[in-house]
Image (tube, rainbow, N blue to C red):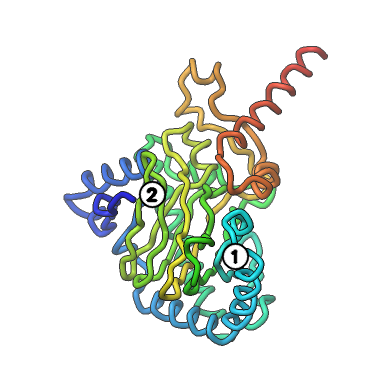
Protein backbone atom coordinates (compact mmCIF):
# COMPACT_ATOMS: atom_id res chain seq x y z
CA UNK A 1 0.00 0.00 0.00
CA UNK A 2 1.38 3.42 -0.92
CA UNK A 3 1.54 6.16 1.74
CA UNK A 4 -1.03 8.96 1.72
CA UNK A 5 1.55 11.73 2.25
CA UNK A 6 1.29 13.01 -1.33
CA UNK A 7 -2.50 12.79 -1.51
CA UNK A 8 -3.75 16.15 -2.86
CA UNK A 9 -5.24 18.39 -0.17
CA UNK A 10 -6.51 21.78 -1.36
CA UNK A 11 -7.20 24.76 0.88
CA UNK A 12 -10.03 26.53 -0.91
CA UNK A 13 -9.36 29.64 1.13
CA UNK A 14 -6.29 30.17 -1.04
CA UNK A 15 -8.47 30.66 -4.11
CA UNK A 16 -9.36 34.16 -2.97
CA UNK A 17 -5.81 35.45 -2.66
CA UNK A 18 -2.37 35.63 -4.22
CA UNK A 19 -1.91 31.87 -3.97
CA UNK A 20 -4.86 31.17 -6.28
CA UNK A 21 -2.66 30.12 -9.26
CA UNK A 22 -0.85 27.53 -7.11
CA UNK A 23 -4.15 26.23 -5.71
CA UNK A 24 -5.65 25.96 -9.22
CA UNK A 25 -2.55 24.09 -10.40
CA UNK A 26 -2.90 21.64 -7.50
CA UNK A 27 -6.56 21.16 -8.46
CA UNK A 28 -5.62 20.54 -12.09
CA UNK A 29 -3.00 17.96 -11.12
CA UNK A 30 -5.43 16.25 -8.74
CA UNK A 31 -8.10 15.94 -11.45
CA UNK A 32 -5.69 14.77 -14.14
CA UNK A 33 -3.52 12.41 -12.12
CA UNK A 34 -5.54 11.32 -9.09
CA UNK A 35 -9.27 11.62 -9.76
CA UNK A 36 -9.54 12.37 -6.03
CA UNK A 37 -8.68 15.29 -3.77
CA UNK A 38 -9.58 16.62 -0.34
CA UNK A 39 -10.70 20.18 0.34
CA UNK A 40 -10.45 22.37 3.42
CA UNK A 41 -12.08 25.75 4.09
CA UNK A 42 -14.85 24.84 1.66
CA UNK A 43 -17.48 27.13 3.13
CA UNK A 44 -19.70 24.58 4.91
CA UNK A 45 -19.90 25.46 8.60
CA UNK A 46 -18.18 23.14 11.03
CA UNK A 47 -21.21 23.43 13.32
CA UNK A 48 -23.48 21.98 10.62
CA UNK A 49 -20.98 19.20 9.87
CA UNK A 50 -20.74 18.33 13.57
CA UNK A 51 -24.54 18.25 13.84
CA UNK A 52 -24.89 15.99 10.79
CA UNK A 53 -22.18 13.66 12.11
CA UNK A 54 -23.78 13.37 15.55
CA UNK A 55 -27.26 12.79 14.15
CA UNK A 56 -25.97 10.22 11.64
CA UNK A 57 -24.11 8.22 14.29
CA UNK A 58 -27.04 8.44 16.70
CA UNK A 59 -29.40 7.24 13.96
CA UNK A 60 -27.20 4.22 13.26
CA UNK A 61 -27.08 3.25 16.94
CA UNK A 62 -30.81 3.77 17.42
CA UNK A 63 -32.21 2.31 14.19
CA UNK A 64 -29.70 0.39 12.11
CA UNK A 65 -27.12 -1.24 14.38
CA UNK A 66 -29.20 -4.21 15.54
CA UNK A 67 -30.39 -4.91 11.99
CA UNK A 68 -26.80 -4.88 10.78
CA UNK A 69 -25.57 -7.17 13.57
CA UNK A 70 -28.23 -9.71 12.62
CA UNK A 71 -27.23 -9.47 8.96
CA UNK A 72 -23.52 -9.67 9.82
CA UNK A 73 -23.92 -12.78 11.94
CA UNK A 74 -25.71 -14.62 9.14
CA UNK A 75 -23.27 -13.28 6.53
CA UNK A 76 -20.18 -14.60 8.31
CA UNK A 77 -21.87 -17.89 9.02
CA UNK A 78 -22.77 -18.38 5.34
CA UNK A 79 -19.49 -17.07 3.91
CA UNK A 80 -16.59 -18.96 5.41
CA UNK A 81 -14.26 -18.74 2.42
CA UNK A 82 -13.05 -15.97 0.12
CA UNK A 83 -15.06 -17.22 -2.87
CA UNK A 84 -18.33 -17.12 -0.96
CA UNK A 85 -17.60 -13.64 0.44
CA UNK A 86 -16.27 -11.95 -2.71
CA UNK A 87 -19.63 -10.37 -3.60
CA UNK A 88 -20.37 -9.03 -0.10
CA UNK A 89 -19.90 -5.54 1.34
CA UNK A 90 -19.60 -4.87 5.08
CA UNK A 91 -21.75 -1.73 5.19
CA UNK A 92 -25.09 -0.47 6.42
CA UNK A 93 -26.60 2.14 4.10
CA UNK A 94 -29.63 4.19 3.21
CA UNK A 95 -30.17 6.64 0.35
CA UNK A 96 -31.68 10.12 0.24
CA UNK A 97 -32.72 11.77 -3.04
CA UNK A 98 -32.55 15.58 -3.21
CA UNK A 99 -33.02 16.39 -6.92
CA UNK A 100 -34.99 16.47 -9.10
CA UNK A 101 -37.45 15.79 -6.25
CA UNK A 102 -36.61 15.12 -2.61
CA UNK A 103 -37.77 11.94 -0.90
CA UNK A 104 -36.39 12.71 2.57
CA UNK A 105 -39.88 13.11 4.03
CA UNK A 106 -40.69 9.55 2.95
CA UNK A 107 -37.71 7.83 4.58
CA UNK A 108 -38.84 6.04 7.74
CA UNK A 109 -37.10 6.26 11.11
CA UNK A 110 -35.54 9.71 10.56
CA UNK A 111 -36.41 12.21 13.27
CA UNK A 112 -37.29 15.80 12.41
CA UNK A 113 -33.94 17.22 13.54
CA UNK A 114 -32.09 14.79 11.28
CA UNK A 115 -34.29 15.61 8.28
CA UNK A 116 -33.78 19.36 8.78
CA UNK A 117 -30.01 19.01 9.15
CA UNK A 118 -29.73 16.79 6.09
CA UNK A 119 -31.77 19.24 4.00
CA UNK A 120 -29.45 22.09 5.00
CA UNK A 121 -26.35 19.98 4.42
CA UNK A 122 -27.58 18.87 0.99
CA UNK A 123 -28.19 22.50 -0.02
CA UNK A 124 -24.65 23.43 0.99
CA UNK A 125 -23.19 20.44 -0.87
CA UNK A 126 -25.16 21.22 -4.04
CA UNK A 127 -23.77 24.76 -4.07
CA UNK A 128 -20.25 23.46 -3.37
CA UNK A 129 -20.50 20.90 -6.19
CA UNK A 130 -21.47 23.64 -8.66
CA UNK A 131 -18.65 25.87 -7.41
CA UNK A 132 -16.17 23.03 -7.93
CA UNK A 133 -17.53 22.31 -11.40
CA UNK A 134 -16.90 25.94 -12.36
CA UNK A 135 -13.32 25.68 -11.06
CA UNK A 136 -12.87 22.60 -13.23
CA UNK A 137 -14.26 24.57 -16.20
CA UNK A 138 -11.71 27.28 -15.56
CA UNK A 139 -8.84 24.81 -15.57
CA UNK A 140 -10.16 23.11 -18.71
CA UNK A 141 -10.67 26.36 -20.62
CA UNK A 142 -14.43 25.77 -20.83
CA UNK A 143 -17.06 28.47 -20.43
CA UNK A 144 -18.20 29.00 -16.86
CA UNK A 145 -21.19 26.75 -16.16
CA UNK A 146 -20.48 24.34 -19.03
CA UNK A 147 -20.08 21.24 -16.86
CA UNK A 148 -23.15 22.00 -14.73
CA UNK A 149 -25.22 22.52 -17.89
CA UNK A 150 -23.88 19.28 -19.40
CA UNK A 151 -25.15 17.37 -16.38
CA UNK A 152 -28.68 18.75 -16.59
CA UNK A 153 -31.23 16.83 -18.58
CA UNK A 154 -33.07 18.71 -21.36
CA UNK A 155 -36.58 18.14 -20.03
CA UNK A 156 -36.30 18.69 -16.26
CA UNK A 157 -33.25 20.94 -16.34
CA UNK A 158 -31.88 19.54 -13.09
CA UNK A 159 -29.14 17.11 -12.15
CA UNK A 160 -29.78 13.92 -10.24
CA UNK A 161 -28.49 14.68 -6.76
CA UNK A 162 -28.61 12.27 -3.84
CA UNK A 163 -26.77 11.06 -0.76
CA UNK A 164 -25.68 7.61 0.34
CA UNK A 165 -25.35 7.45 4.12
CA UNK A 166 -23.17 4.54 5.19
CA UNK A 167 -21.76 3.01 8.33
CA UNK A 168 -18.89 0.52 8.23
CA UNK A 169 -19.00 -1.24 11.61
CA UNK A 170 -16.08 -3.21 13.07
CA UNK A 171 -15.52 -6.40 11.08
CA UNK A 172 -14.21 -9.55 12.79
CA UNK A 173 -13.01 -10.95 9.45
CA UNK A 174 -11.54 -8.09 7.37
CA UNK A 175 -9.45 -10.72 5.61
CA UNK A 176 -12.66 -12.24 4.26
CA UNK A 177 -15.08 -9.37 3.59
CA UNK A 178 -14.61 -5.97 1.94
CA UNK A 179 -16.13 -2.83 3.40
CA UNK A 180 -17.05 -1.88 -0.17
CA UNK A 181 -15.68 -3.58 -3.28
CA UNK A 182 -13.50 -1.68 -5.75
CA UNK A 183 -15.39 0.37 -8.35
CA UNK A 184 -15.51 3.70 -10.15
CA UNK A 185 -18.48 5.98 -9.58
CA UNK A 186 -20.92 6.26 -12.47
CA UNK A 187 -21.86 9.88 -12.22
CA UNK A 188 -20.46 13.41 -12.21
CA UNK A 189 -18.79 14.81 -9.11
CA UNK A 190 -18.96 13.15 -5.69
CA UNK A 191 -18.56 14.95 -2.37
CA UNK A 192 -17.80 12.81 0.69
CA UNK A 193 -18.01 13.75 4.36
CA UNK A 194 -16.12 10.90 5.99
CA UNK A 195 -15.23 9.87 9.51
CA UNK A 196 -12.10 11.63 10.74
CA UNK A 197 -11.16 8.87 13.20
CA UNK A 198 -11.71 5.62 11.32
CA UNK A 199 -10.06 5.21 7.92
CA UNK A 200 -10.52 2.60 5.23
CA UNK A 201 -11.13 4.50 1.98
CA UNK A 202 -8.47 3.79 -0.64
CA UNK A 203 -7.97 4.66 -4.29
CA UNK A 204 -5.95 2.85 -6.93
CA UNK A 205 -3.06 4.91 -8.30
CA UNK A 206 -0.25 3.56 -10.48
CA UNK A 207 -1.13 0.00 -9.53
CA UNK A 208 -1.03 0.59 -5.76
CA UNK A 209 -3.78 1.25 -3.22
CA UNK A 210 -3.41 4.66 -1.55
CA UNK A 211 -5.14 5.67 1.68
CA UNK A 212 -7.42 8.71 1.58
CA UNK A 213 -6.48 10.46 4.84
CA UNK A 214 -9.29 11.18 7.30
CA UNK A 215 -9.18 14.90 8.13
CA UNK A 216 -11.52 16.76 10.47
CA UNK A 217 -14.16 18.86 8.67
CA UNK A 218 -12.76 18.13 5.21
CA UNK A 219 -14.71 17.10 2.13
CA UNK A 220 -13.26 14.41 -0.12
CA UNK A 221 -14.03 14.94 -3.81
CA UNK A 222 -13.80 12.37 -6.58
CA UNK A 223 -14.73 12.39 -10.24
CA UNK A 224 -17.16 9.96 -11.84
CA UNK A 225 -17.33 8.26 -15.23
CA UNK A 226 -19.44 11.04 -16.76
CA UNK A 227 -16.82 13.71 -16.13
CA UNK A 228 -14.23 11.46 -17.75
CA UNK A 229 -16.39 11.34 -20.88
CA UNK A 230 -17.27 15.05 -20.91
CA UNK A 231 -13.61 16.05 -20.44
CA UNK A 232 -12.60 13.60 -23.19
CA UNK A 233 -10.33 11.75 -20.78
CA UNK A 234 -8.49 14.82 -19.48
CA UNK A 235 -9.91 13.97 -16.07
CA UNK A 236 -10.34 10.35 -15.04
CA UNK A 237 -12.61 8.42 -12.72
CA UNK A 238 -10.55 6.00 -10.65
CA UNK A 239 -11.14 2.72 -8.86
CA UNK A 240 -11.63 3.03 -5.12
CA UNK A 241 -12.71 0.78 -2.28
CA UNK A 242 -13.37 0.68 1.45
CA UNK A 243 -11.30 -1.76 3.47
CA UNK A 244 -13.19 -3.30 6.40
CA UNK A 245 -11.64 -2.44 9.76
CA UNK A 246 -11.43 -4.63 12.88
CA UNK A 247 -12.02 -1.62 15.16
CA UNK A 248 -14.17 1.49 14.95
CA UNK A 249 -17.38 2.33 13.12
CA UNK A 250 -16.60 4.45 10.05
CA UNK A 251 -19.17 7.05 8.97
CA UNK A 252 -19.48 7.92 5.28
CA UNK A 253 -21.88 10.49 3.80
CA UNK A 254 -21.35 10.53 0.03
CA UNK A 255 -23.34 12.97 -2.10
CA UNK A 256 -23.52 12.37 -5.84
CA UNK A 257 -24.05 15.29 -8.23
CA UNK A 258 -24.96 13.27 -11.31
CA UNK A 259 -26.51 13.99 -14.70
CA UNK A 260 -30.26 14.17 -15.09
CA UNK A 261 -31.63 10.85 -16.25
CA UNK A 262 -32.30 12.18 -19.77
CA UNK A 263 -29.03 14.11 -20.09
CA UNK A 264 -27.08 13.27 -23.25
CA UNK A 265 -23.43 12.81 -22.31
CA UNK A 266 -20.61 13.31 -24.81
CA UNK A 267 -17.13 14.88 -24.91
CA UNK A 268 -17.06 18.67 -24.85
CA UNK A 269 -16.29 19.71 -28.46
CA UNK A 270 -13.70 22.23 -27.24
CA UNK A 271 -11.68 19.36 -25.73
CA UNK A 272 -11.77 17.10 -28.79
CA UNK A 273 -9.00 17.32 -31.37
CA UNK A 274 -9.77 16.53 -35.03
CA UNK A 275 -7.96 13.18 -35.00
CA UNK A 276 -9.73 12.20 -31.76
CA UNK A 277 -13.11 13.06 -33.23
CA UNK A 278 -12.45 10.67 -36.10
CA UNK A 279 -11.31 7.92 -33.75
CA UNK A 280 -14.19 8.46 -31.32
CA UNK A 281 -12.31 7.90 -28.06
CA UNK A 282 -15.44 8.34 -25.93
CA UNK A 283 -19.06 7.59 -26.85
CA UNK A 284 -22.26 9.59 -26.77
CA UNK A 285 -25.14 8.19 -24.69
CA UNK A 286 -28.10 9.00 -22.45
CA UNK A 287 -27.19 8.84 -18.78
CA UNK A 288 -30.17 6.65 -17.88
CA UNK A 289 -28.97 4.06 -20.40
CA UNK A 290 -25.48 4.17 -18.92
CA UNK A 291 -26.88 3.55 -15.44
CA UNK A 292 -28.78 0.48 -16.62
CA UNK A 293 -25.47 -0.99 -17.74
CA UNK A 294 -23.57 0.26 -14.69
CA UNK A 295 -25.79 -1.41 -12.11
CA UNK A 296 -25.02 -4.77 -13.71
CA UNK A 297 -21.28 -4.17 -13.95
CA UNK A 298 -20.48 -1.72 -11.14
CA UNK A 299 -17.64 -3.75 -9.67
CA UNK A 300 -15.89 -4.21 -12.99
CA UNK A 301 -13.59 -2.01 -15.09
CA UNK A 302 -15.22 1.06 -16.67
CA UNK A 303 -13.64 0.64 -20.11
CA UNK A 304 -15.96 -2.14 -21.30
CA UNK A 305 -18.92 0.06 -20.39
CA UNK A 306 -17.58 2.84 -22.62
CA UNK A 307 -16.84 0.35 -25.38
CA UNK A 308 -20.39 -1.03 -25.23
CA UNK A 309 -21.81 2.39 -26.08
CA UNK A 310 -19.22 2.97 -28.78
CA UNK A 311 -20.42 -0.27 -30.37
CA UNK A 312 -24.01 0.97 -30.22
CA UNK A 313 -22.92 4.20 -31.95
CA UNK A 314 -21.10 2.25 -34.66
CA UNK A 315 -24.05 -0.05 -35.26
CA UNK A 316 -26.40 2.94 -35.52
CA UNK A 317 -24.11 4.67 -38.00
CA UNK A 318 -23.91 1.53 -40.14
CA UNK A 319 -27.70 1.23 -40.17
CA UNK A 320 -28.01 4.85 -41.31
CA UNK A 321 -25.41 4.30 -44.04
CA UNK A 322 -27.19 1.18 -45.33
CA UNK A 323 -30.55 2.95 -45.31
Across and down, in percent, residue 237 comes to: 47, 43
Q: Nearer the viewer, mark 2 or mark 1?
A: 2
What residue is at 34 percent from the left and 57 percent from the top?
38
Q: How many marks?
A: 2
Examine the rendered structure and indicate whether residue 301 appears above or below residue 200: above
Q: Are marks 2 and 1 in contact (CB under 8 Å)?
A: no
Apparent side of residue 18 relative to residue 137 in the rendered image (left or right): left
Question: In the orientation shown, which residue stands out farthest toward the front?
Answer: 81
Judge the density around disc 2: few (<14), some (14-19), many (≥20) Cα neighbours within 10 Å. some
Residue 320 occupies which quadrant of the picture?
A: top right
Residue 154 seen in render: no
Seen from this angle, which residue lies furthest left? 18
**Residue 100 x/y as whole percent:** 64, 59
Tell me what residue is drawn at x 36 percent, y 57 percent: 212
Inspect this view and state whether residue 81 appears.
yes
Which residue: 76% across, 13% down? 321
Residue underneath mark 2: 209
Secondary element at image label 1 = strand
| Quarter where residue 287 is shown | top right
Q: Nearer the viewer, residue 303 or 115?
A: 303
Q: Whole-Å distance between the Cαs marked 2 and 1?
A: 32 Å
Which residue does the numbered mark 1 point to in the structure image?
Answer: 98
Disc 2, SS: strand
Is 174 placed left or right of 153 in the picture?
A: left
* Relative image position of residue 117 (x, y in whole percent): 50, 78
Say the numbered circle drawn on residue 175. Answer: none
Amino acid sequence: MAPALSFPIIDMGLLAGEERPAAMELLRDACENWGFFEILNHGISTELMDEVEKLTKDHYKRVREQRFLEFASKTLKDAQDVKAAENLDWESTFFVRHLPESNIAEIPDLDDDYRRAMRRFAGELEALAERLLDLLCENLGLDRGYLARALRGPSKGAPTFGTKVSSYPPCPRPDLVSGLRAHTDAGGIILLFQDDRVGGLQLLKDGAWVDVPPLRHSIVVNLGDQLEVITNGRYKSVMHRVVAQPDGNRMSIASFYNPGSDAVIFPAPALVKAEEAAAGAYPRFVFEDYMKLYVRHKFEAKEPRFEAFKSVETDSSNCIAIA
